[in-house]
Image (tube, rainbow, N blue to C red):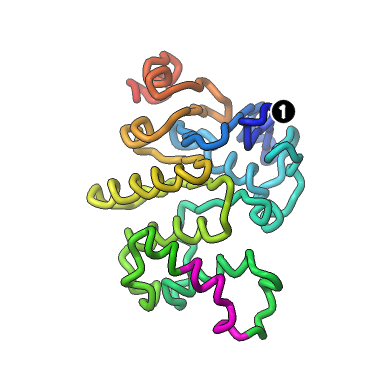
Amino acid sequence: MDSQVVLEARSLKKSFGALQVINDVNLRVSRGAIHSIIGPNGAGKTTLFNLLTGFLKASSGEVIYQGKNITDMHPFRIAKMGLARSFQITSVFPELTVHENVRVSAQATEKNPYNFLYNYKHLKGAKAKADAILESIGLFEQRDQICKNLSYGDRRVLDIGISQATDPEVVLLDEPLAGLQAADHERIVGLIQDMAKSMTVVLIDHNIDIVTSVSHIITVLNQGEVIAEGTPEEVQGNPKVQEAYLGGV
C-alpha cells in the first residue's frame, strides 16, 4: 500500500434489496489532503461515508485504513483508530453545555473513558482538551451555554469541534455547510482549512464553489459510481461531470 494513502475503498458495493446504491467504488485518500466527494442528489455520497466509517456494512469490497482492513469493524472501534466523522444533522447533546459536549468526546481518549462513576472534575486532560478545541473554533465564550440555545451555525461549528476531540488522523465531514446562511460559510471554510493543517479531511457538500475552492482532490459520484476524479480544475472541465449536473458545476 502507498504510504501516502491513509484511507481506501476497494471495489466497494452496497445494495438494499434490488437497489444498488454503491457500485464498485474505488477511492484513495492521500494523507494531509482535503479530498471532497460530490455528486447530484441520490448519488450515494452519504452511503459511501457510512460504509467507510462502519455505520453500514458493505455488500462486497473492502475499506482499508492505514493499511488495515476495517470493513467489518464497528463504528466505535473505527473511531478509536483515528477515523472520525460528523453528520448531516447536528449530533450535539442539546441539554449539555458546549464544553460538556466536547469533553464527553475528548473523554473517549482517556483511560477508562466509560467509567461514569469517576468524578468528572478529575478528568483534567479531557477538560483541557475541550477548552483548547473551543478556543480554536471560536466557541470558548459560549462554553457554559446549553447547546439547545445555540444558533444553528454555532451548532454546526460545535459538531466540527466534537469530531476533533478524539484526535483523529482523518475526519469525514458530511455537508458541514448544510442549512447555513452565506454569512457562516466563510467561518466553516476557515475551520476546514485549519483542520487540514493537522489531519486529513474528507468532505461532502453541495456548495460546488466552496468545494472547488478548498479541495486538493475531488471525486465525483453519480448513481453510485465514480465518474470522475482529479483536481478541481480537471473535474470542472470534465464532460461527464457537466452532464451529471445538467449544465455544469
- Please, is residue 14 above or below residue 175 in the view? above
Q: Residue at x 50, y 35 (%)?
A: 33
Question: Picture quarter containing residue 60?
Answer: top right
Q: Which residues are magenta?
A: 119-130
Q: Residues within 10 Å of mark 1 (few under 14, many from 20)?
A: few
Q: On the rendered structure, is 185 left or right of 94? A: left
Report x, y in % for residue 96.
46, 77
Report x, y in % for residue 244.
43, 23
Q: Secondary structure at mark 1?
A: loop
Which residue is the site of mark 1?
Answer: 1
Report x, y in % for residue 221.
52, 29
* Amino acid type shown at disc 1: Met
Q: Residue at x 71, y 55 (%)?
A: 77
81 vs 219, nearest the viewer: 81
> Does residue 141 belong to the magenta stretch?
no
Question: Picture quarter containing residue 143?
Answer: bottom left
Q: On the rendered structure, is 150 left or right of 175? A: left
- Please, is residue 163 above or below residue 117 in the view? above
Q: On the rendered structure, is 14 left or right of 159? A: right
76 vs 239, nearest the viewer: 76
Report x, y in % for residue 44.
55, 36
Q: Residue at x 34, y 45 (%)?
A: 189
215 vs 63, nearest the viewer: 215
